[in-house]
């Protein structure tokens, strides 16, 4: 018995597809569920297709869920003097914030226009988010100051080193990639297809990371030492650059117009250098936001280093393609 999926059935399949994966489940679980569901439905539907050659499709649109694997692994050095506080000449604080990327979800969408049976142009938009993490070493403070304490208030030179436990790095690096590729169809039968594509485009990279440390020290009455520690969140401003990409795609036809596809893609963005900017500042112990005057003072005193990362990534894509016949 021949099986034919109607236009209404196709619309229901495409429309209900995202509902199965809604919610806040872990991305790995979502990918497993998506793979299982699509493979089972694909095999059942493909088995019932009429035994005829696949029609060539002048135009197709696609939508994919992505699991992205980044290669971010660097450190952001931070060192600032405490000489803005009177009497603390030669004092400084330093740390190296670990920045490591973790795989995270994304999406891609676009369309392909075929110029012949085997050759076409593909315009695609890909979004990837790389969550940042990293265990950090303690925040180090070196102090040099003169203390005058009762009863005689005789000046004494004090040199001390302090170590403050530091929380892990948090943040994200986002990548939006618009690409135009040349696509070549290796084969396209009534059930299976395979194609390659490669090309170039424009990549926008931006994000944020924290917590960078900042300290203020001062001497109060009777020579008592006071301090305040801060957690600084940095914004990574948008950077645009030319980028390259390539992918290999395998398709399993589940109806005359719909194909389930799995694709491996690599997006090469090279090295990108940013000049981070202070986005927000919290008090270390209370985690309350600082007032505007304190924020302005820290911005004026804190010197930030450049951040250099390599936002290239590998993506596993699973999704649906819809074919239009002219």
Image (spheres, rainbow, N blue to C red):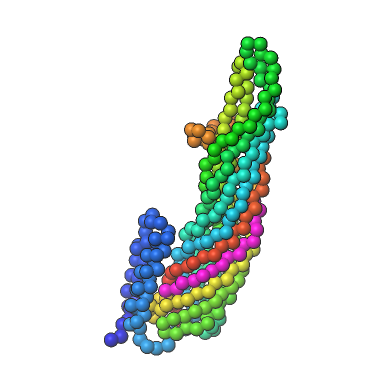
Name the residue at 52% across, 81% down: 185
Q: Is residue 267 magenta?
A: yes
Q: Is residue 268 above or below residue 140?
A: below
On-image quarter of the N terminus: bottom left
Overall secondary structure of the magenta stretch? strand
In percent of width and height, residue 102 lies at 51, 56
Residue at the far top in the pictured view: 151
Name the residue at 54% across, 55% down: 101
Q: Give the range drawn in magenta.
A: 260-274
In percent of width and height, residue 229 lies at 57, 33
Q: Quadrant of residue 251?
A: bottom left
Residue at the far left in the pictured view: 1
Q: Does the magenta stretch include residue 61?
A: no
| Residue 153 visible, this angle | yes
Residue at the far right in the pictured view: 90
Q: In this view, does 216 lie to the left or right of 29?
A: right
| Residue 298 visible, this angle | no
Q: In this view, does 196 lie above or below 84?
A: below
Name the residue at 36% across, 66% down: 17
Q: Is residue 79 above or below residue 311?
A: above
Q: In which quarter of the image is residue 79?
A: top right
Of residue 86 and residue 238, the one placed in the foreground of this image is 86
In percent of width and height, residue 293 lies at 58, 31
Of residue 318 and residue 125, the one placed in the foreground of this image is 318
Q: Is residue 10 left or right of residue 323?
A: left
Name the residue at 42% across, 77% down: 252
Q: Quadrant of residue 21?
A: bottom left
In percent of width and height, residue 136 lies at 56, 44
Of residue 57 and residue 141, the one placed in the foreground of this image is 141
Q: Is residue 164 left or right of residue 321?
A: right
Residue at the far bottom in the pictured view: 52
């Amino acid at each position: 018995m021949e099986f034919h999926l109607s236009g209404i059935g196709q619309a229901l399949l495409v429309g209900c597809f995202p509902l199965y994966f809604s919610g806040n489940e872990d991305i790995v679980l979502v990918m497993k569920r998506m793979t299982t569901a699509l493979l089972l439905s694909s095999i059942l539907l493909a088995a019932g297709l009429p035994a005829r050659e696949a029609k060539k499709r002048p135009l197709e649109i696609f939508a994919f869920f992505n699991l992205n694997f980044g290669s971010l692994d660097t450190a952001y050095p931070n060192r600032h003097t405490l000489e803005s506080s009177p009497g603390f000449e030669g004092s400084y604080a330093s740390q190296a914030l670990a920045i490591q990327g973790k795989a995270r979800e994304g999406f891609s969408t676009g369309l392909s226009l075929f110029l012949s049976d085997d050759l076409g142009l593909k315009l695609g938009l890909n979004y990837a988010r790389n969550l940042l993490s990293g265990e950090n070493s303690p925040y180090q403070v070196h102090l040099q100051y003169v203390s005058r304490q009762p009863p005689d208030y005789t000046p004494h030179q004090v040199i001390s080193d302090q170590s403050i436990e530091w929380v892990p790095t948090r943040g994200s690096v986002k990548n939006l990639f618009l690409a135009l590729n040349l696509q070549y169809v290796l084969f396209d039968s009534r059930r299976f297809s395979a194609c390659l594509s490669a090309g170039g485009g424009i990549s926008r990279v931006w994000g944020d990371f924290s917590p960078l440390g900042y300290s203020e020290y001062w001497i109060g009455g009777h020579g008592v030492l006071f301090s305040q520690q801060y957690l600084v969140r940095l914004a990574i401003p948008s950077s645009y650059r030319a980028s390259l990409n390539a992918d290999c795609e395998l398709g399993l036809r589940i109806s005359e117009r719909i194909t389930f596809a799995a694709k491996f893609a690599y997006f090469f963005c090279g090295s990108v250098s940013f000049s981070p900017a202070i986005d927000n500042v919290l008090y270390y112990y209370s985690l309350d936001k600082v007032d505007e005057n304190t924020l302005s003072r820290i911005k004026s005193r804190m010197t930030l280093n450049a951040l250099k990362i390599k936002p290239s990534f590998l993506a596993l894509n699973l999704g649906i393609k819809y074919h239009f016949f002219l």
